[in-house]
Image: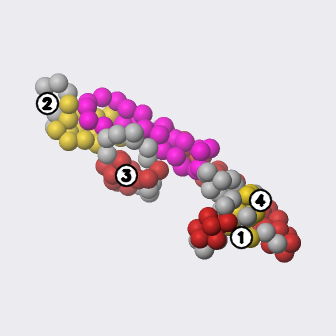
Amino acid sequence: MRIILKDDISSLGKYGDVIQVASGYARNYLVPRGLAIEITDGNLRAVEHQKDAWMRKAQKIKEASSNLKNELEALMLSFARKAGEDEKLFGSVTSMDITAALKDKGFNIDRKKIYLEEPIKSIGVYTVPVKLYQQEVVANLRISVVKE
């Protein structure tokens, strides 16, 4: 089934793309959730008309994300945790901890945008990627974990 995407979907494409997917996937998942519409002449014209406005909006969001990236990269978060003799933490620093610390600094970042492969479990300085706008704008947040 051929559909028009109404949102950016990382595994399929970007807004306005015409793609071919399995008909069950389109009818049962994409169309009911408003992520895609079926192809018709009217839908193609409507999407082309809306695409310009959407591109301007996406550009503004990207610029705001770039400004936020610069602010986050200038920031250094510090966490004091109890640790043993071998500098292993008795707990860990997770994306929820990082989100809470950022909120205290005035940044409202969703924890799902903070990409830790696994929680930080030892003392040191780390760089954590924060995906602010799709795959295009990624801030590298510096985190310091010190012994309490």
Dot 1 corresponds to which residue?
37
Which is closer to the viewer, label 1 or label 2? 1
Q: Is residue 79 above or below residue 62?
A: above
Which circle's residue, 1 or 3, is located before the other in the chain? 1
Label 4: how many residues lie within 10 Å, few (<14), some (14-19) or many (20+)? some
Which one is closest to the eye, mark 1 or mark 3? 1
Q: In which quadrant will I find the N terminus?
A: bottom right
Which percent across, then down, holds residue 106? 41, 55
Q: Quadrant for the C terminus, please.
A: top left
Horizontally, is 44 left or right of 127 in the view? right
Asked whether the beta carbons under mark 4 and mark 2 sit within 8 Å of each other, the answer is no
State yes or no: discs 1 and 4 in contact (Cβ < 8 Å). no
Mark sitting earlier along the chain (1/2): 1
* Residue 107 falls inside the magenta stretch: no
Q: Residue furthest top?
A: 86
- Closer to the chain start, of discs 1 and 4, is 4
**Residue picked out by circle 2:** 84
Q: CA distance from mark 4 to mark 2?
A: 56 Å
Q: Nearer the viewer, residue 22 or 129?
A: 22
Measure the C-alpha gap from mark 1 to mark 2.
Answer: 57 Å
Name the N-terminal-most of marks 4 and 2.
Answer: 4
Identify the mark nearer the N-term, 2 or 3: 2
Of the image marks 3 and 4, the number of the one nearer the N terminus = 4
The Cα atoms of the two marked residues, 1 and 4, are separated by: 10 Å
Q: Which mark is residue 99?
A: 3
Question: Mark 3: few, some, or many residues within 10 Å (few <14, many ≥20)?
Answer: some
Q: Main secondary structure of the magenta part?
A: strand
Look at mark 4 in the image and give the residue it sits on: 18
Q: Residues within 10 Å of mark 1 (few under 14, many from 20)?
A: many
Instruction: Tell me if mark 2 has few (under 14), some (14-19) or many (20+) residues whose alpha carbon lies within 10 angstroms of its own.
Output: few
